Amino acid sequence: MCDEWTSAGEEAALAGAGLSRRAFAASAAAAVATASAASQAAAAEAGLIETPVLIPTGDGKADGFFIRPAHGTHPAILMWPDIAGLREAYKVMARRLALAGYAVLVVNHYYRTARAPLLASMAEWMTPAGQARLKPAIAAITPARTLADARAFIGFLDAQPGVARGRGIGTCGYCMGGPYAVRTAAAVPARVAAVATLHGAGLVTDAPDSPHRLLGETKAAFLFAIARNDDARAPADKDALKAAAAAAHRPAEVEVYAADHGWCTIDAPSYNKAEAERAWGRMLSLFSRL
């Protein structure tokens, strides 16, 4: 998860680019606005249908963003955002997946606290005010609640007319969303066939229900794309993931990328386009099995 360790890395990245946090926030907002406009135009040209949604759960109604091709049925993807939550950057990414032929649901995992967006960008998370706002929202999420939410979200997807219910569902998670993606596969093993975690946080812990201990409860194939600074901090994690996948007889691609935590998210200081595109390609290859 984004913490003091990754914040120090982000500071170094900004300094190397000659940017202050304020300058970065402005440039990132402009980049996301440009990407959003382009993605909306591409989605409209391709005839995609996008809509805000409310999904009943055991704790209320979770808000989300759902986008799919207008015609036919397609494999579904459940996308879990990073620590800054559902925001425009993730809608851009969802549109891109939908353009590749998927019905995509991006969820607000903080719905128990507030409707999305809680923060407009990753830059806000990097401020004391942003962290203070998210602290109670993060505290409201537990492994048990994530499992329950996953079942509700998969149930929602299976009820949509544009979803191919005869094909497997994929899920992807970024940062703190990485463990949620793994738990989704354990929550609904009969439906979730592919899991991608991108700079996932907390995948290997000492807890009995650590995500890496859940692989045997799934029927999915996995992609674990690891940030180099996360690997530097916990170099044994990649080996634990490989061992857990082998023990569970689950196919898994485990790789450390030449980029830092957050590199796949377009509004992050550590965004690395080349490595983000490489990870995106590996994720699409995984989802092509659905």
Image (spheres, helix red, strand yellow):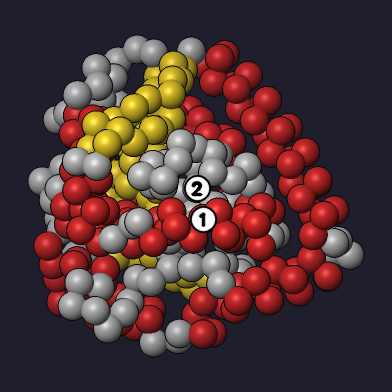
Image height check: is 127 above or below 107?
below
Q: How many marks?
A: 2
Q: Residues within 10 Å of mark 1 (few under 14, many from 20)?
A: many
Image location of residue 279, percent across then percent down: 50, 56
Which residue in the structure is indicated by mark 1?
134
Q: Residues within 10 Å of mark 2 (few under 14, many from 20)?
A: many
Q: Residue at x 45, y 85 (%)?
A: 234
Residue drawn at x 24%, y 79% as measured from the top left: 207
Q: Disc 2 or 1, which lies upstream in sequence?
A: 2
User: Could you tell me which secondary element the residue under label 2 belongs to?
Assistant: loop
> Does 81 sit left or right of 31 as displayed?
left
Image point (57%, 13%), residue name? 45
Q: Which residue is mark 2?
A: 85
Q: Nearer the viewer, residue 224 or 217?
A: 217
Q: Amino acid at mark 2?
A: Gly
Task: Say whether marks 2 and 1 touch (CB < 8 Å).
Answer: yes
Residue 134, percent from left and from top: 51, 55
Say if 172 sits above or below 204 in the image.
above
Amino acid at pointer 1:
Leu
Q: Identify the secondary structure beneath mark 1.
A: helix
Q: Is residue 112 left or right of residue 129?
A: left
